Amino acid sequence: DVKVTQSSRYLVKRTGEKVFLECVQDMDHENMFWYRQDPGLGLRLIYFSYDVKMKEKGDIPEGYSVSREKKERFSLILESASTNQTSMYLCASSPPGSGYYEQYFGPGTRLTVT
Amino acid sequence: SQQGEEDPQALSIQEGENATMNCSYKTSINNLQWYRQNSGRGLVHLILIRSNEREKHSGRLRVTLDTSKKSSSLLITASRAADTASYFCALVNTGGFKTIFGAGTRLFVKA
């Protein structure tokens, strides 16, 4: 079974802190994604990566950065956390040619910024 | 980029009844996918239907796609309490790369 894991299920951080969210997949997938999910808004794409050291901005990249040093690991970084970044963060992976294949999601990290 | 719009936003039914959720969109698509999300968890892929397909089945799930009406429906037959979840349609536009998720339909199945 494909497994996508995220480093934390729940996280509470203070405004201004630097926050790292880690995601690891074990299926040798080329594509990895970070989404945030807010009530009534569905999933919004923050960043995605289609190869090691490659990254592309999604629809809402402001305030975030990413790192992909190894194929299996995709990190989301909040440079200076703000209260409007309180949300559920979901990581996903898929084989190459994403959009043509299903995405496999991690369990999510619920981040609260106080 | 377009987003699928699910209808209804919420649905409450009795166990054993069928549940139908709809997704409408505006431009041409490569494929359309349905995902399920149990409360506070990640999404699980249910079915992918390509633009040249009209209907697909998977167990108690039936998905239809009408590209002329730009709409899709997900039917869950003989629902169970365990089907209680949010259901999302996700689109890949023709020539596009990203999968775009709708806001979801919340289904509650009463035992």
Image (cartoon, grey):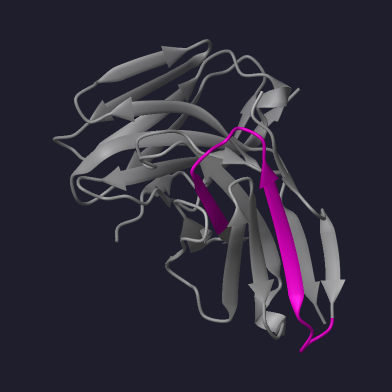
Q: Residue A19 is drawn in which quadrant?
A: bottom right
Q: Residue at x 30, y 57 (%)?
A: B2
User: Farthest residue in the top direction?
Assistant: B59
The quadrant of the rendering that contains the C terminus of chain B is top right
User: Between B85 and A37, which is closer to the camera in this rendering?
Assistant: A37
Q: Position of residue A18 (x, y in %)?
A: 76, 80
In the image, what residue occupies the spot 61% across and 59% down?
A: A69
Vertical comparison of B23 with A81: above or below: above
Where residue A28 appears, as percent x and y from the top left, is 57, 35
Marks counted in the figure total 0
Closer to the camera, B6 or B89? B89
Q: Is residue B92 left or right of residue B46?
A: left
Q: Is residue B102 left or right of residue A69?
A: left
Is residue B69 shown to the viewer in this render? yes
As for residue A83 lying within the magenta part, the answer is: no
Residue shown at 72%/82% (left/top)?
A81
* Quadrant into which the N terminus of chain B falls: bottom left
Residue A28 shown in magenta = yes
List x then y, in percent, for residue A15. 78, 87
The magenta region covers: A14-34
| Residue A38 in view | no
